[in-house]
């Protein structure tokens, strides 16, 4: 265990206090990124993760802008979009609790991406 990188996240049932292991005080955080996803306790966890996924999707589009603006066939552009952009937006979504607002936010972001490049 790398104690310099280890963080502690507490829920509302725990009284916050300093935690020390082998003389190193662990950082108490409310959220952190682990294996590509935001980990956070509370109601707005999936909203923040969806916002982050949408930002990462736009970053992926920015990196592939030269492909989408090139004269390659539309079918190849669609393959790039499905394999390199859509997966960035939906990574980990199978574990999310979808609300109407969250679905709407993802649909709007996806439709903007599609309209911009197709």
Image (cartoon, rainbow, N blue to C red):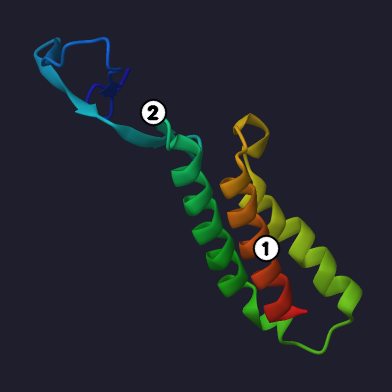
Residue at x 50%, y 35% (from the top left corner):
35
Q: Which mark is residue 110?
A: 1
Residue 78 drawn above or below residue 9 = below
Q: Is residue 55 left or right of residue 90?
A: left
Q: Residue at the location (83% across, 69% down)?
A: 78
Q: Is residue 108 above or below residue 18?
A: below
- SS for dot 2: loop
Residue 67 visible to the viewer: no
Along the horizontal axis of the image, is 88 left or right of 80? left
Q: Are marks 1 and 2 in contact (CB under 8 Å)?
A: no
**In this view, 43 is above or below 55:** above
> Quadrant of residue 2 in the image?
top left
Position of residue 49 measured from the top left corner of the image (x, y, whole percent): 49, 44
Local secondary structure at mark 1: helix
Query: For this view, does 18 lie left or right of residue 81?
Result: left
How far apart are the alpha carbons under marks 1 and 2?
Answer: 26 Å
- Identify residue for label 2: 42
């Amino acid at each position: 265990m790398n104690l310099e990188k280890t963080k502690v996240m507490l829920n509302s049932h725990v009284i916050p206090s300093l935690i020390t292991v082998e003389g190193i005080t662990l950082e108490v955080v409310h959220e952190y990124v682990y294996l590509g996803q935001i980990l956070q306790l509370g109601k707005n966890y999936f909203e923040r993760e969806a916002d982050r996924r949408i930002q990462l999707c736009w970053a992926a589009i920015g990196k592939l802008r030269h492909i989408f603006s090139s004269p390659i066939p539309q079918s190849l552009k669609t393959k790039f979009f499905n394999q390199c952009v859509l997966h960035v937006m939906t990574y980990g979504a199978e574990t999310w609790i979808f609300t109407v607002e969250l679905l709407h936010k993802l649909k709007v972001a996806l439709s903007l991406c599609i309209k911009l490049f197709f």
